[in-house]
Image (cartoon, rainbow, N blue to C red):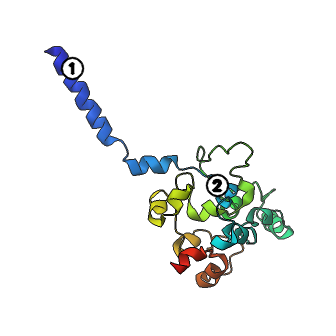
Amino acid sequence: MKTFTSFFAVLTLALVVFQATPGNAEEEAAIRQYIGVQACGMCHKKAATGDQLGQWQGSAHAGAFATLASEAAKKIATERGIADAQKAPECLEWHVTQPAEGHVATPRKGKEGFLVEHGVQCETCHGPGSEYKSRKIMKDHDAAVAAGMVVPDQTLCITCHNDRSPTYSGFNFEEMWAKVNHPNPKNAEA
């Protein structure tokens, strides 16, 4: 009887611990990893589907990290007592995607994977792509969102484009959205 009671106590404890652990959504969010612009660009580079990679490559977002090496950035950094803007957390906050430790996927052999030097890249706005990157999921918008794809909006944009930046001079969402929006023309026709 004592063995049965001990077994029952252990089983009860296990159920309590199981119920106290995070739900599946929290666990899934914890494993989402950044895959890098090269991986995103594999499917998002054709003109027929909107050439999102090309649009990003021609944008200020793509050059955001390189901007920190400009004379203007060096001047701002010097005024603020910063030796190297490309290494300063207070500058990188605005100019690169900074995943938490352990949230960068190991790149496939021969691929560069996620690099901070790519600046403000796909996953800065759309969230880590490891769970929604497959063609099957990406063909179903709702499934992609359920797997962690973020649909950017004004609220997301102003987390960076705000008066905390030393170069902020206002932010017109509609005007800027027209510059960075990159829809798939096939989806627009549907």
The quarter of the picture where residue 63 lies is bottom right
Residue at label 2?
A: 98
Q: Is residue 4 above or below residue 48?
A: above
Q: Is residue 165 left or right of residue 2?
A: right
In the picture as drawn, the residue positioned furthest to the right comes out as 71
Residue 89 at x, y = what percent? 69, 56
Query: Which residue is found at the position 66% from the left and 55% from the top?
Result: 39
Residue 21 at x, y = what percent? 36, 41
Query: Which residue is found at the position 54% from the left and 80% from the top?
Result: 189
The three-letter amino acid code for the residue at tag 2 is Gln
In the picture as drawn, the residue positioned furthest to the left comes out as 1
Q: CA distance from mark 1 to mark 2?
A: 48 Å
User: 72 and 37: which one is in front?
Assistant: 37
Query: Badge 2: how crowded within 10 Å, few (<14), some, or many (20+)?
Result: some
Query: Badge 1: how crowded within 10 Å, few (<14), some, or many (20+)?
Result: few
The three-letter amino acid code for the residue at tag 1 is Ser
User: 165 and 104: which one is in front?
Assistant: 104
Q: Mark number for residue 6?
A: 1
